[in-house]
Every structure is written in structure tokens, then in C-alpha cells.
């Protein structure tokens, strides 16, 4: 059994026991969060409607950072060069329960 959940602006496929990264939230490690469900697949049965009561419970394990991304801008013959870096912040969570 797995579910498609909405976490921030992204949708991810999760199953019980999976560890995923979602956009940063201000929740302490060890707390639980409930994520809204978009679709549930249980063997051959696919449920995509009537999921008002369905939820996925996750436990926060900690905060992480994504890979470093380098942004470089350059314009020829003008002496313009700019370099900037970015690391996205994530919250790492473990899926504990999928309920319908």
C-alpha cells in the first residue's frame, strides 16, 4: 500500500517506513505531522476520490539541507560577473501510518 501526499508545493509517493524530505517546517524533532492525501493505491484498488478522512501520519526526525547550487551570471565585454550560492532547507520525516 502506498499513497501520494501533498507536502508544501510538491507531491510525493510514500509507503509506511519511508524516510522523505519535505520543505522546512517549524516542528521539533520527535513530533508528528499529518499530511493531506491525494491518492491511495492498495494492490489493484486505486482510491482518488472521497479522501476527506484519509491521512498520512509522519514523525519528524530532523532538519537537513539540500545540495549546494551555484548561480553564475556573466555579460560579455562589460566586466559584469556575479556568483551566488544556495542550499535549500528541508525537514526529514518518517512515514508511520497511512489511514483511510
Image: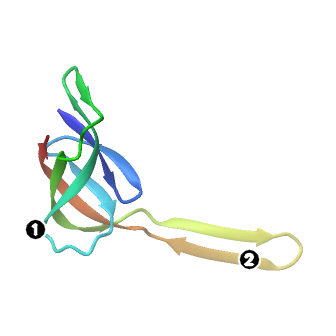
Quarter that holds the C terminus: top left
What is the C-alpha distance between the residues marked 2 and 1? 45 Å
Question: Horizontal and vertical percent for residue 69?
Answer: 52, 65
Q: Quadrant of residue 65?
A: bottom left
Name the residue that disc number 1 marks. Answer: 30
Which of marks 1 and 2 precedes in the sequence?
1
- For image coordinates 71% across by 70% down, the residue present is 73
Camera-nearest residue between 3 and 75: 3
> Does 79 sit above or below residue 13?
below
Quarter that holds the N terminus: top left
Helix, strand or loop under label 1: loop
Residues at discs 2 and 1 in contact (Cβ within 8 Å): no
Camera-nearest residue between 53 and 67: 53
Residue most extreme to the right = 77
Q: Which mark is residue 83?
A: none
Question: Horizontal and vertical percent for residue 42?
Answer: 18, 28
Q: Residues within 10 Å of mark 2 (few under 14, many from 20)?
A: few
Name the residue that disc number 2 marks. Answer: 81
- For image coordinates 40% across by 52% down, the residue present is 10
Q: Residues within 10 Å of mark 1 (few under 14, many from 20)?
A: few
- For image coordinates 44% across by 69% down, the residue present is 87
> Does 98 sit above or below residue 63?
above
Question: Horizontal and vertical percent for residue 85?
Answer: 54, 73
Amino acid at each position: 500500500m502506498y499513497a501520494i501526499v501533498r507536502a508544501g508545493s510538491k507531491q510525493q509517493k510514500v509507503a509506511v517506513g519511508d524516510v522523505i524530505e519535505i520543505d522546512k517546517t517549524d516542528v521539533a524533532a520527535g513530533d508528528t505531522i499529518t499530511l493531506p492525501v491525494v491518492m491511495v493505491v492498495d494492490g489493484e484498488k486505486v482510491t482518488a476520490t472521497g479522501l476527506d478522512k484519509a491521512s498520512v501520519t509522519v514523525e519528524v526526525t530532523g532538519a537537513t539541507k539540500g545540495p549546494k547550487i551555484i548561480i553564475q551570471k556573466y555579460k560579455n565585454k562589460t566586466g559584469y560577473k556575479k556568483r551566488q550560492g544556495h542550499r535549500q532547507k528541508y525537514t526529514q520525516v518518517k512515514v508511520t501510518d497511512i489511514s483511510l
